[in-house]
Amino acid sequence: MDLYLMRHGDAGDAGVTYTDDAARKLTDIGKAKTRAMARALNAMKYEAPSIVISSPLVRAIETAEIVHDLFAPDAKRETTNAILPGSEMETSMAYLASMFKKHETVMLVGHEPHLSHFGSILIAGSYGGSIEMKKSAVAIITMSSLDVPRMRGLLRALLPPKLAHLDQ
């Protein structure tokens, strides 16, 4: 059971172009980096997830749509509040466990600091030693236990946008 955690692409600065943070859209740079990451996942021959799930915030939905189109075109699409910023970790874990009952490979597209904290808990059991999720970054975790709240996995890859010169 593999889990992809992906942070949404660049959506500009909050409050500068949008008064409603939830409505922020990806910038052209955010779209380009997300497309490049999706292509890099394909080029490295990672298995596509069977479901791509995003938070309901516009920038996460747009990121998920790009990844769906370029990396996982056969995957189902879904949104959930369980991975919104500020979500309880046990809520996110319970949601993820329910997805793994139906899918062998799952991708969650969300936000910071929730994704870094969530990934750190899954890998190390605590927030300590937090993984860093830059915009458009992907972490790949092979899950070993789906037992909430002791859900655990092994970090297989942490792919920052610098990979393949994606941030230039």
Image: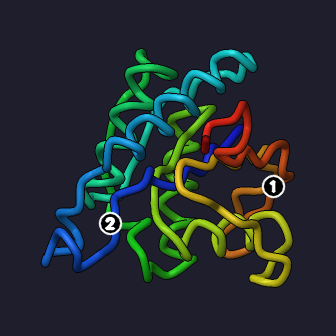
**Residue ID at (45%, 59%):** 110
- Mark 1 vs 2: CB contact within 8 A: no
Task: Pinpoint residue 127: horizontal percent, then vertical percent.
Answer: 75, 82
In the image, residue 162 above or below residue 111: above
- Secondary structure of the residue carrying numbered label 2: helix
The tag on residue 81 is 2
Q: Which quadrant of the figure contains the N terminus?
A: top right
In the image, residue 35 above or below residue 69: below
Q: Nearer the viewer, residue 132 or 94?
A: 132
Query: Reading the chain from its start, which is encountered first: label 1 or label 2?
Result: 2
The tag on residue 153 is 1
**Residue ID at (31%, 50%):** 26
**Residue ID at (73%, 38%):** 163
Q: Which quadrant of the figure contains the C terminus?
A: top right
Q: How many numbered callouts? A: 2
In the image, residue 106 above or below residue 112: above
Q: Nearer the viewer, residue 100 or 165?
A: 165
Measure how far apart labels 1 and 2 are at the Cα level. 22 Å
- Secondary structure of the residue carrying numbered label 1: strand
Q: Nearer the viewer, residue 92 or 42?
A: 42
Quarter of image, res 84? bottom left
**Residue ID at (71%, 66%):** 132
Task: Pinpoint residue 18: horizontal percent, then vertical percent.
Answer: 16, 71
Task: Pinpoint residue 74: horizontal percent, then vertical percent.
Answer: 42, 16
Dot 1 surroundings within 10 Å: few (below 14), some, or many (20 or more)? Answer: many
Residue lying at the far left in this picture: please name it. Answer: 19
Q: Is residue 43 left or right of residue 5?
A: right
| Amino acid carrying mark 2 in the image | Asn
| Amino acid carrying mark 1 in the image | Gly
Quarter of image, res 40? top right
